[in-house]
Image (cartoon, rainbow, N blue to C red):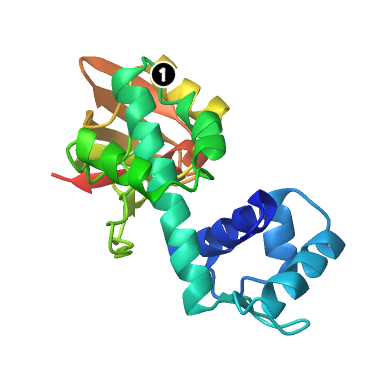
Amino acid sequence: MLTKNEEDYLKALFHLTEEMEEDRAGVNQLAEYLNISPASVTAMLKKLKTKDLVEYERYGKLELSSDGKAIAVDLIRKHRLWETFLYKYLNFQWDEVHEVAEQLEHIKSRKLIDQLDKFLGHPIRDPHGDIIPGKDGTYHVLPKTTLSDLSAGDKCKLIAVRDNSVAFLRYVAEIGLALSSEIDVMDKRDFDGSMEIGFEGKRINISAKFAENVFVEVM
């Protein structure tokens, strides 16, 4: 049986290599993502390699084995189901669910997760708009367009966010945006990529960094 720490490494590596599609995900990238030292990452990777969960060579590209990927996808499935439950039924806000789901995702009971999925009506997306993997382990990383990809005059709908940090999600809520918000791109400045957007009768300026962290569906 894997420890919580080992599972967290597998999920982090999956996020980097599959969801963010990093071509050269290595020790330093994983260390930065987890906010720990490269030496600690190297030690854990060696341990996971002995369990045939990662493919790792010193200074080489990191990859999950098929077993490692299956474990990571299962963790993501549990995490996003718990986020959905907390948001929909326990009055947690979308900036509050991530931290609690990080703890709940390590529960081992298969029956509990299956019943949770059934209770929720087999949802496809979590409160942040991310795809929930299927019970059979199927997981699709869909092509995503960010708000920063659009130009003045474009119209879109907010479907997900890249940054799940509490600070970013609170900021999104504070300015009045939410999933399914319809957005008009009023202006985009060539100098710094900042934008003026309109939604629900409001017009606000957003930074390029903000636009890069919002996924949209062009309308």
Q: Position of residue 148 (x, y in %)?
A: 38, 47
Q: Specify the amino acid type for callout 1.
A: Phe
Q: Residue at x 52, y 63 (%)?
A: 14
Q: Is residue 45 above or below residue 144?
A: below
Q: Is residue 21 visible?
A: no
Among the 4 quarters of the image, the one containing residue 198: top left
Q: Residue at x 65, y 76 (%)?
A: 51
Among the 4 quarters of the image, the one containing residue 113: top left
Q: Position of residue 127 (x, y in %)?
A: 33, 33
Q: Position of residue 99 (x, y in %)?
A: 55, 31
Number of labels in the image equals 1
Q: Residue at x 55, y 27 (%)?
A: 166
Q: Position of residue 92 (x, y in %)?
A: 41, 18
Q: Is residue 209 visible?
A: yes
Q: Is residue 209 above or below residue 186?
A: below
Q: Residue at x 38, y 42 (%)?
A: 80
Name the residue carrying label 1: 92
Task: Answer left or right for 47 relative to 159.
Answer: right
Q: Quadrant of the C terminus?
A: top left
Task: Answer left or right for 138 relative to 121.
Answer: right
- At label 1, counting other C-alpha atoms closer than 10 Å, the crowd grade (few under 14, some 14-19, many 20 or more) is some
Q: Is residue 29 above or below residue 114?
A: below
Task: Decide which of 63, 142 is in the foreground and name it.
Answer: 63
Task: Decide which of 215, 34 is in the foreground and name it.
Answer: 34
Element at badge 1?
Answer: loop
Q: Quadrant of the N terminus?
A: bottom right
Task: Answer left or right for 4 relative to 202.
Answer: right
